[in-house]
Image: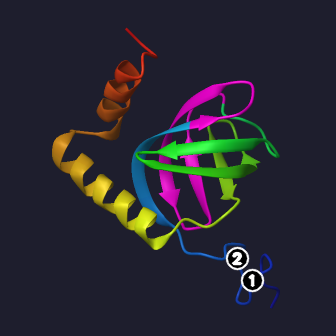
Amino acid sequence: MRSFGKKIGGGRRGASREPMSLPATMSTIETNFTAKLSDLSRTGARLTGERLPGVGKPVVLRIDCVKVFGTVAWASRDQCGVNFDEPLTHFETARLRREVKLAMLTWRNIDEKLAVDDWANGLVR
């Protein structure tokens, strides 16, 4: 039986990902992108949004108070995966888990929170 990827037992990820829905900002040298975090591990993330950067682009990803540098590993029409240059700390991942729980209590859905964040950041009027 042939295994997929490079990891023993198959798969490519070195760290397990968990679903996590939070607004995110991704920046390249040229432009900024508003996205929605779909899942997260200590070593990478999957994001959803319009016109996201292409494969190989270095990015700065901001999610809540966490800022991490990485590279776009794969991209499709409305999603991309980012590999982080350095893994997130346990404190950062725990903080983001708490933020997801708080957002679920405060906002009806992630799109509402994205709209409020866009307004607060001056991206829409």
Q: Quadrant of the C terminus?
A: top left
Q: Is residue 45 above or below residue 41?
A: above
Q: Which residue shows up at 49% across the image and 47% down it?
A: 37
What percent of the width, then of the height, locates residue 77? 68, 36
Q: Which quadrant holds residue 117?
A: top left
Q: Is residue 49 above or below residue 89?
A: above
Give the number of callouts.
Answer: 2
| Pointer 1 local density, CA inside 10 Å: few below 14, some 14–19, many at least 20 | few
What percent of the width, then of the height, locates residue 102? 22, 51
Q: Which residue shows up at 37% across the image and 67% down it?
A: 94
For this orientation, the residue located farthest to the top is: 125
Q: Are marks 2 and 1 in contact (CB under 8 Å)?
A: yes
Span of residues in magenta: 26-51
The reply to whether the magenta stretch includes residue 44 is yes
In this rendering, does residue 50 appear at all? no
Q: Which residue shows up at 17% across the image and 49% down it?
A: 105
Q: Amino acid at mark 2?
A: Gly
Q: Amino acid at mark 1?
A: Lys
Q: Which mark is residue 66?
A: none
Q: Is residue 80 left or right of residue 54?
A: left
> How has the structure been colored for display?
rainbow
In this rendering, does residue 120 appear at all? yes
Query: What main secondary structure does the magenta stretch of the protein show?
Result: strand
Q: Which mark is residue 7?
A: 1
Cα separation, mark 2 vs mark 1, equals 6 Å
Q: Nearer the viewer, residue 94 or 35?
A: 94
| Pointer 2 local density, CA inside 10 Å: few below 14, some 14–19, many at least 20 | few
Q: Which residue is mark 2?
A: 11
Tell me the element at label 2: loop
For this orientation, the residue located farthest to the left is: 105
Q: Quadrant of the N terminus?
A: bottom right
